[in-house]
Image (cartoon, rainbow, N blue to C red):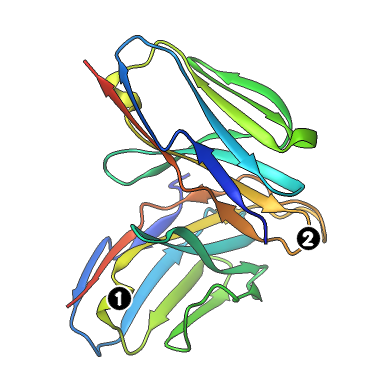
Amino acid sequence: DAGVIQSPRHEVTEMGQEVTLRCKPISGHNSLFWYRQTMMRGLELLIYFNNNVPIDDSGMPEDRFSAKMPNASFSTLKIQPSEPRDSAVYFCASSLYRLAGGPYNEQFFGPGTRLTVL
Amino acid sequence: GIQVEQSPPDLILQEGANSTLRCNFSDSVNNLQWFHQNPWGQLINLFYIPSGTKQNGRLSATTVATERYSLLYISSSQTTDSGVYFCAVEDNYGQNFVFGPGTRLSVLP
């Protein structure tokens, strides 16, 4: 398996521009997670999906952030408009969710997208 | 929400030394994972260990869920073990996933 795939690996943009980050989970996994890593706040969960449905987006910092999962093999995280404080590494992870109310299985992380907003 | 603490925050070792990293959490958890973030930023799975003990080569981990802690043991450390070690937990309630602040390990040749 190719693992979790993220693109682009690096993104440099100017303040006010729209940014779209992409993620392909591991085939067969039915849960997908978006995280953000910064020096100040460490690794934070932004949003996660089960079977393509958003379950909890309480970690999304502002309305400027949105995430979608149109099918089991693709998700996007969009920032519009972007601001310098959005500069961070954004990770996508996937896992296999077994039972309603049960624990998640092991999460596997993609290589991350390093976003710089000037 | 659940709080996750890791200690020590920083650790410097000579190659060949052993070390123990600790993760404390403030509430019951459904699962716990240990990760190694290498100097290139990759998050590498080490253990999925909600309870009990597991071993993988020079690394082993123990989680005592009833006492709300987990330990990661690194034996005969190598320079390639350098990086940041994170524990991450899923709480029992809202399926919230929380990472600890990490332990930064530097192994010197």
As drawn, the label of residue B93 is 2
The residue shown at (67%, 62%) is B1
The residue under label 2 is which amino acid type? Tyr
Residue drawn at the location 30% of the way across and 76% of the way down:
A85
Q: Is residue A112 left or right of residue A104?
A: left
Amino acid identity at mark 1:
Arg
Element class at badge 1: helix
Q: Position of residue A113 (x, y in %)?
A: 32, 62
**Helix, strand or loop for disc 2:** loop
Which residue is at a point 74% across and 47% down the rendered structure image?
B29
> Which residue is labeled 1 in the image?
A85
Q: Is residue B49 visible?
A: no
- Along the horizontal axis of the image, is A13 left or right of B16? left
Quadrant of the rendering where the C terminus of chain B is positioned = top left
Crowding at label 2, few (<14), some or many (≥20) Cα neighbours within 10 Å? few
Rendered view: B108 above or below B5: above
